[in-house]
Image: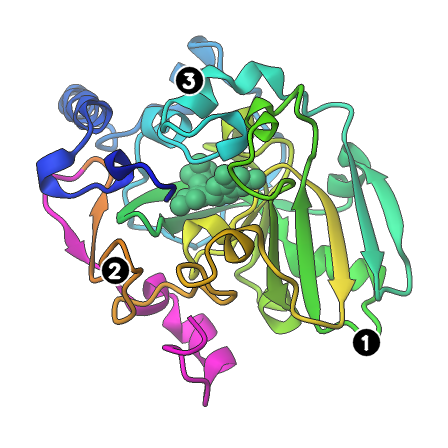
Amino acid sequence: MLIKPTNDLRWRDVTPKELYLRRREFIQAAGLALLGSAAGLVSPAQARAQGKGAKLPNVNKSSWGQGETPTAYEAVTTYNNFYELGADKDDPSRNAASLKPRPWTVSIEGHVAKPAKYAIDDLVKPHQLEERIYRLRCVEGWSMVIPWVGFPLRDLLTQVEPTAKAKFVEFTTLMAPNQLPGQQRPVLDWPYTEGLRLDEAMNPLTLLAVGLYGEVLPNQNGAPIRLVVPWKYGFKSIKSIVRIRLVDRQPKTAWEKSQPSEYGFYSNVNPEVDHPRWSQARERRIGEFLKRPTLMFNGYGDQVASMYAGMDLRRNF
Ligand SMILES: Nc1nc2c(c(=O)[nH]1)N[C@H]1C(S)=C(S)[C@@H](COP(=O)(O)O)O[C@H]1N2
Ligand SMILES: [Mo]
């Protein structure tokens, strides 16, 4: 989504990494199919054997995304955008170790009756974790299907009691150039920030994720806690959050500040509104060969379209 033409995944310039991942998945799918397992998956047990995250206890299954084939663990954890850890897709996983997700504090402030600073484990503990398989659509034209583990943001917001003045929610990523070396260069106006309207934040789909594939969130995916807003472009799903602030005005997001003509506040997945540099009509699901049509609201219209009734989604892009 930066500046670099190699991020534009058209057929003629698919990166070697993408081809590598697809080939890996093909081989894994073939191998697992022989064993009678789900195609394309690396099981959490295999992942742990490879030294990946610890398993999260007491995770409820949910019906979200049942019947969809999750993108391979390998791709989900090595093909990332996390500019604080580098601009290339494999930078975040290569540089992940510099981020220290413990100890970690999240402050919830602004127009709430009960502002609080939580140590990350105290923040998560009261909430029942569930697995939700959601589609993630990046504005660059690729998508994945990711089995997240987390809890609805609304449960946390309800707990701190937004006041009548709270109309929007602003999220902020950790600012620590020693842990997030990308912040040593002025790629964005650091720290990364994002925002939602209060009703979007309170929508039951909006998730705070602390894991994926049944395991603690890998650093490159936004440890220890990140947002997942499945009907919006991937950049709304801010990683490694340290502050959640309830505000009365629409906050400026980091991408809006950097390129206002390209990144609007709403950023709902919309095949009819092209990004100036990338058509949004179709997408490449990582692991698949042919592009598929992009769905309005990333296919979650039944749950979210009513929030935008009467709004001009070309103006409010
Ligand atoms: N702090 C922060 N959050 C971020 C980003 C980032 O660069 N920094 N990239 C965004 C973009 S462009 C995408 S597509 C998603 C990717 O999430 P994933 O790596 O878990 O697939 O993270 C989003 N959250
Ligand atoms: Mo993205």
Instruction: Indicate the amino acid at tag 1.
Output: Lys
On residue 165, the disc is 1
Q: Where residue 313 sits in the image (x, y, percent)?
A: 40, 78
Q: Where residue 173 sits in the image (x, y, percent)?
A: 65, 40
Q: Nearer the viewer, residue 94 or 184?
A: 184
Q: Dot 2, how many residues are within 10 Å of its Cα: few (below 14), some (14-19), or many (20+)?
A: many
Q: Which residue is mark 2?
A: 280
Relative to 22, say whether 146 is above or below. below
Q: Residue at x 64, y 67 (%)?
A: 202
Q: Are marks 1 and 2 in contact (CB under 8 Å)?
A: no
Q: Nearer the viewer, residue 114 or 62?
A: 114
Q: Residue at x 74, y 46 (%)?
A: 243
Give the magenta range. 288-317
Q: Dot 1, how many residues are within 10 Å of its Cα: few (below 14), some (14-19), or many (20+)?
A: few
Q: Which quadrant of the view contains residue 121? A: top right
Q: Earlier in the sequence, mark 3 or mark 1?
A: 3
Q: How is the image coloured?
A: rainbow
Q: Dot 3, how many residues are within 10 Å of its Cα: few (below 14), some (14-19), or many (20+)?
A: some
Asked if residue 148 can be seen in this view, the reply is no
Q: Where residue 67 sits in the image (x, y, percent)?
A: 29, 50
Q: Residue at x 60, y 31 (%)?
A: 223
Relative to 90, say whether 159 is above or below. below
**SS of the residue under disc 2:** loop
